[in-house]
Image (cartoon, rainbow, N blue to C red):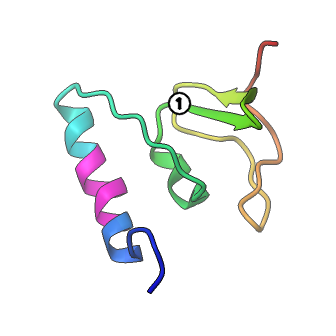
Amino acid sequence: MGGGPGPAFKHVFYTRLLAGLKARGKTVLVITHDDKYFDVADRIIKLDYGKLVWRAGTGGAVAKRGTGGEVLQKNEKAES
C-alpha cells in the first residue's frame, strides 16, 4: 500500500481544515511536493537542495502555471 494521505483526505485538509484554522488566526506550515493545492497558500517558499530558490507573495497566487503545474512566472524573486 502506498504512503501518504489519499486524495479525499488531501481535499478536505487543504480546502476545509486549513481554511478553518486560518479563520481562527492560526499559522500552519505545510511541507509538500503536491502543487495541486498551492493556490490555497498565503505564501509559498521553494527550496532546492536546502537553498531558497524563490517565494510567492501573500496573495495566494503563484502566478502563471504550465499545463503540468510548473510555475512559469514568479511573483517575487528570492533574495540570496
| Residue 24 screen position, x and y as percent | 16, 30
| Residue 76 screen position, x and y as percent | 73, 23
Q: Residue at x 44, y 42 (%)?
A: 30
| Residue 72 screen position, x and y as percent | 83, 47
Q: Secondary structure at mark 1?
A: loop
Question: How many other residues sit within 10 Å of disc 1, few (<14), some (14-19) or many (≥20)?
Answer: some
Indicate yes or no whether the magenta region holds residue 40.
no
Task: Specify the quadrant of the image occupied by residue 7.
Answer: bottom left
Q: Residue at x 77, y 67 (%)?
A: 67
Query: Does residue 42 sit above or below 30 in this rendering?
Result: above
Task: Specify the quadrant of the image occupied by residue 36.
Answer: bottom right
Left or right of residue 62: residue 25: left
Left or right of residue 12: residue 2: right
| Residue 68 screen position, x and y as percent | 76, 67
Name which residue type carries label 1: Arg
Q: Main secondary structure of the magenta part?
A: helix
Query: Does residue 49 sit above or below 7 in this rendering?
Result: above
Q: Residue at x 31, y 69 (%)?
A: 9
Left or right of residue 5: residue 17: left
Who is closer to the viewer here, 28 or 75?
28
Q: Residue at x 43, y 68 (%)?
A: 4
Furthest residue to the top? 80
Furthest residue to the left? 24
Quadrant containing the C terminus in the rendered view: top right
Q: Which residue is mark 1?
A: 43
Q: Which residues are magenta?
A: 11-18
